Amino acid sequence: MAKKGTEKVDRDKDEDEDTRQGMLDYFKDWFQCTPSIYPPNLHDLVELKYGRVIRRGHNRVVGIKTKDYNIYDAVDAKYTKIVYEFIPMGKRQEKLEVNGSYILKKKDIQDAPWSFGSCHACWKMKERNFTDITRTPHPYQASPTEPNLSVLGGCGHVICNACVMKVERYTLEDEPYRSCPYCGNPHAFPRDLRMWCISEEVDLHYKNIMKTKTKDKNSNAEI
Ligand SMILES: [Zn+2]
Ligand SMILES: [Zn+2]
């Protein structure tokens, strides 16, 4: 009997591995996406209504300057880690577990280039700073609805979770992609995958917290 039980567990494990491999194959192109090295245009590229692009190309393309960074408290960031989370039918889990089965992949970016660090879509609202650890949590330590998380789109734009959720609110469940609220790319955010794009500062801060926790645990064990 016991043997039969073990066989079943093994079979389940194999099936889990097959499913996981299937998902990795399915999303493999998304794992190639990298954060754009360009800051946003000074003016909106597209106009959205109810999460859909209703107008584009209506504004002049003007690059932003240091003066604009200062006016809008904008920053640049180096994204050193991307965590790919599977979100079946667009429904995130209550909590993202470290090494949990919903994490499909983690990617470290060596020598990360400078990218924009204040949400390509809502930067003029001055609400996001993905390098500021007092404002931006690590996705492992945040609620799925935390507005300050940084999400990578297939178009390369780094958008805050609040802006992505705003588009999602108006997207039907059977639509496989959500549009980028900055550039209007209709295939920017897959319904079933979140690409958490983590700045060097947030990544480091999280690692330090974990290191302290492990140290505490060890010292407790010694007592
Ligand atoms: Zn935003
Ligand atoms: Zn975009």
Image: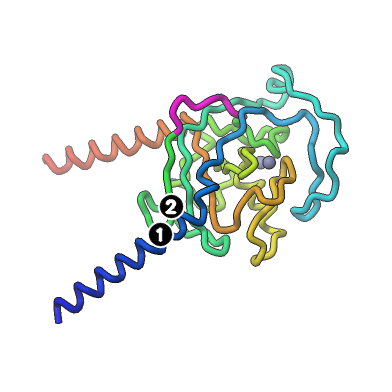
Residue 122 is drawn in which quadrant? top right
The tag earlier along the polypeptide, 2 or 1, is 1
Using a 10 Å C-alpha cutoff, classify the residue at mark 1 as few (fewer than 14 neighbours), some (14 to 19) or many (20 or more): some
Chief SS of the magenta region: loop
Residue 158 position, x and y percent, is 61, 38
Residue 110 is drawn in which quadrant? top left
> Is-magenta flag for residue 112?
yes
> Is-magenta flag for residue 38?
no
Outermost residue on the left side: it is 222
Q: Point out the stretch of residues depicted in magenta.
A: 109-115
Applied colour scheme: rainbow
Q: Residue at x 69, y 64 (%)?
A: 172
Residue 107 is drawn in which quadrant? top left
Is 93 above or below relative to 136? below
Q: Secondary structure at mark 1?
A: helix
Is 117 above or below relative to 177? above
**Would you say the residues marked 2 and 1 are in contact, meaning their CB atoms lie under 8 Å apart?**
yes
Q: Tell us which disc is closer to us: 2 or 1.
A: 1
Residue hosting label 1: 20
Residue 178 position, x and y percent, is 67, 54
Residue 194 position, x and y percent, is 54, 50
Using a 10 Å C-alpha cutoff, classify the residue at mark 2 as few (fewer than 14 neighbours), some (14 to 19) or many (20 or more): some
Residue hosting label 2: 104
Amino acid under disc 1: Arg
Outermost residue on the right side: it is 58
